[in-house]
Image (tube, rainbow, N blue to C red):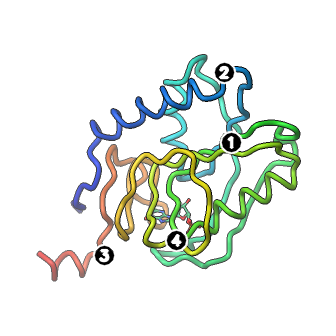
C-alpha cells in the first residue's frame, strides 16, 4: 500500500545533518548522557548519533501511550532501566515525535526523579496543534500538521517503521474513498 510522502529521505538527511552540527557544538564542556525513547526514535537516534562528534552511543527508555491503531490511550507507560546513568548529569532526550506532549512531560519528571541535573530534548517531529501540555523542546526537526505519520522508525500497530521517509498514514477505506 502506498502512503503519501510527507518528508522525503533527502530532506530528512539534510535536516538531521544540520541538527547534528547544532547539538554537536552545544555542549563543549559537558558531554550529555543520551537517552532515546524506543521504539519510535531509534532510527532518528542512530542517524543523529553517527553524525555527532565521537559517534556517541545512547541509553534507552521504552515509552508507550498508543494501543492498537492511531488513538492514544492518554496514559503513558514507561519502562526505564534502574541503572540509567543520569544522576547529576546533563541528559539529552531523543524523541521521534511530540504530539500531545504527555510522553515528554512524563519523561522529564521521571528523569528528574532519577536525579538528572538538566534535561534537553530533541525531537525529529512536533505536532504543535495537538499539544495538551506545555513542554520545552530544545531542537525540533520539523513541525508537522495534525496527521498520523509512519516511517523512519514510526509505526502503526508495529508496521511501516522500515520506510525510509515519513509518510501520512491513511486507513485503507479512507484511501479508497479519497482517491
Ligand atoms: P504524546 O505523548 O501524545 O506527545 O505522544 C508521543 C508518542 O506517541 C510518540 O513518541 C510516538 O510514539 C507516538 N505518536 C504520536 N503521534 C504519532 C504519529 O503520528 N505516528 C506515530 N507515532 C505517534
Dot 2: element: loop
- Would you name the residue on which mark 2 appears? 28
Dot 4: element: loop
Badge 3: residue crowd in 10 Å (few <14, some 14–19, many ≥20): few
Where is residue 17 drawn, in percent x and y?
A: 41, 29
Measure the alpha-carbon separation of dots 2 and 3: 46 Å
- Would you name the residue on which mark 1 appears? 35
Q: Is residue 59 above or below residue 159?
A: above
The structure residue drawn at horizontal position 77% and vertical position 43%, both measured from the top left corner, is 118
Is disc 4 in contact with disc 2, using a CB cutoff of under 8 Å?
Answer: no
Question: Nearer the viewer's eye, disc 4 or disc 3?
Answer: 4
The structure residue drawn at horizontal position 30% and vertical position 63%, both measured from the top left corner, is 168
Give the mark nearer the N terminus: 4 vs 1: 1
Question: Nearer the viewer's eye, disc 1 or disc 2?
Answer: 2
State yes or no: Cβ of the residue under disc 4 lies below 8 Å from any atom of ligand 1. Answer: yes
Measure the alpha-carbon separation of dots 4 and 3: 23 Å
Give the mark nearer the N terminus: 3 vs 1: 1
Where, by quadrant of the figure, is residue 88 drawn?
Answer: top right
State yes or no: Cβ of the residue under disc 1 lies below 8 Å from any atom of ligand 1. Answer: no
Measure the alpha-carbon separation of dots 3 and 1: 32 Å
Dot 1: element: strand
Q: Is residue 115 above or below residue 158?
A: above
- Would you name the residue on which mark 4 appears? 131
Measure the alpha-carbon separation of dots 1 and 2: 18 Å
Give the mark nearer the N terminus: 4 vs 3: 4
Quarter of the image for the N terminus: give it. Answer: bottom left
Where is residue 11 drawn, in percent x and y?
A: 29, 40
- Would you name the residue on which mark 3 appears? 171
Dot 3: element: loop
Amino acid at each position: 500500500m502506498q502512503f503519501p510522502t510527507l518528508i522525503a529521505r533527502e530532506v530528512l538527511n539534510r535536516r538531521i545533518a544540520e541538527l547534528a552540527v547544532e547539538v554537536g557544538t552545544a555542549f563543549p564542556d559537558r558531554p550529555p548522557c543520551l537517552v532515546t525513547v524506543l521504539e519510535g526514535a531509534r532510527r532518528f537516534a542512530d542517524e543523529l548519533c553517527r553524525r555527532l562528534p565521537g559517534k556517541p552511543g545512547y541509553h534507552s527508555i521504552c515509552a508507550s501511550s498508543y494501543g492498537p491503531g492511531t488513538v492514544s490511550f492518554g496514559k503513558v507507560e514507561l519502562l526505564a532501566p534502574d541503572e540509567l546513568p543520569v544522576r547529576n548529569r546533563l541528559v539529552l532526550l531523543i524523541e521521534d515525535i511530540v504530539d500531545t506532549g504527555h510522553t515528554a512531560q512524563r519523561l522529564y519528571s521521571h528523569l528528574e526523579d532519577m536525579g538528572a541535573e538538566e534535561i534537553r530534548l530533541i525531537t525529529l517531529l512536533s505536532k504543535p496543534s495537538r499539544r495538551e501540555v506545555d513542554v520545552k523542546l530544545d531542537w525540533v526537526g520539523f513541525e508537522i500538521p495534525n496527521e498520523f505519520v509512519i516511517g523512519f522508525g514510526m509505526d502503526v500497530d508495529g508496521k511501516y517503521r522500515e520506510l525510509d521517509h515519513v509518510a501520512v498514514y491513511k486507513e485503507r477505506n479512507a484511501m479508497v474513498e479519497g482517491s
